[in-house]
Image: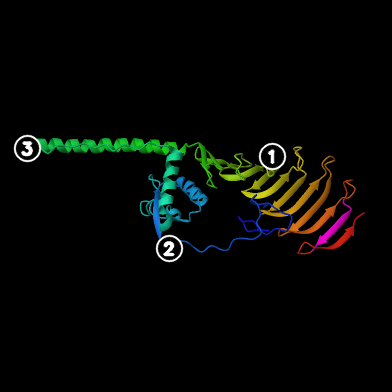
Amino acid sequence: MFCPNCGAEYREGFTVCSDCNVPLVTELPGEEEIGFTKLVTVYETGDPAVIPFAKSILQSEGIKYFIKGESLQDLFAGGRLGTGFNPVIGPVQIQVDENDVEKAKELLNQIEQREFDLSETDTVSEQTETIEDSGGKKHGIKGFLRGIIIGILISGIGLYVYDYKKKHFSGVVEYDTNKDSKPDLFYIYRNRVIVEVDEDRNFDGKVDLWEFYKEEIVDRGESDNDFDGRVDTKFSYENGVLSRVEIDTNNDNRPEIIEDYTHGVLFARSWYHESSRNLWKKTYLAGGVMREEYIDQDYDGTFDIKIIYNSSERPVKTDILH
């Protein structure tokens, strides 16, 4: 069994990837060929905070993209200055395959309207009539200059409002990943910072996976893996990497199975008795493969049996401890 997301391999009996929380498949799809033939710029921005939005919506729709100039903004001249982009490099450009141009433009325009709901600033212009005498010409130039100054002031106010709304945006951005006209993935922001991601993994209209963020890094999570409306699994992360999973198998709000991870890889799994809460079984893994198993047969709090497994998870030695 394989995880279609990270590619991890599991032995028979596992149905869900412990790292990605997605259903396992019997075989991985073949490696996709690179689809880009000609890249076309579909979006430009000077706001680095907009780029993650654009990436996420393109990824959710399966559109391959290239971000041009993102890593070069702070390397030349005065950096981004007050414009949000480097004047030497220019704004960041999002490029896609020429076959995806129309769809990508439509999606990115929807993001701009949906997330920020900003009104466009009207261009202010003044028309001056040409007067043949010198006094008339002087008056026309003054009117022209006055129009430019007014236009600059109005544009400056509009940019300030636009920037303020973007920096203080709070709300939910919804995505329909399976295209059934119902949202199933929800990104929740406060003041332009992501604080939570919710997902309806079985598309029944109910959220069954919650991930909570601190300083834009996932910190903990909860899930309803049997889709009965009750949380049965809790996740802990260290610096955005999975470190612990607690599974409540009988809905008593206490975990009966605890998994410990190092660098995101499972290395130990513990089973606790439903009533006595005694540890009655524990397994140790290496590289995701079980190598040792300890069992307390009489549930007295002391392990009675130790089993050694080979690299194929086949038991090769059994020791009686008591």
| Residue 173 visible in the shown view | yes
Three-letter residue code for mark 1: Asp
Residue at which label 1 appears? 228
Q: Is residue 97 visible?
A: no
Magenta span includes 305 = yes
Residue span colored magenta: 303-309
Residue 241 screen position, x and y as percent: 63, 50
Residue drawn at (87%, 46%) of the image? 301
Q: CA distance from mark 3 to mark 1?
A: 85 Å
Residue closest to the far left? 133
The number of callouts visible is: 3
Identify residue type, mark 3: Asp
Q: Identify the residue at the far right of this view.
A: 322
In the picture of the structure, the residue carrying the numbered disc 3 is 133
Q: Quadrant of residue 226?
A: top right
Q: Residue at x 75, y 47 (%)?
A: 258
Q: Residue 122 bears which disc, if any?
A: none
Tell whether 288 sits left or right of 212.
right
Give the Cα separation between the discs numbered 1 and 2.
46 Å
Question: Dot 2: within a 10 Å radius of its alpha carbon, few (fewer than 14), some, or many (20 or more) residues?
Answer: few
- The first of marks 2 and 3 along the sequence is 2
- Location of the N terminus by quadrant is bottom right
User: How far apart, in angstroms, are the residues tagged by discs 2 and 3?
Assistant: 61 Å
Helix, strand or loop at mark 2 = loop
Dominant secondary structure, magenta: strand
Q: Nearer the viewer, residue 167 or 209?
A: 209
Q: Is residue 16 magenta?
A: no
Q: Which residue is mark 2?
A: 37
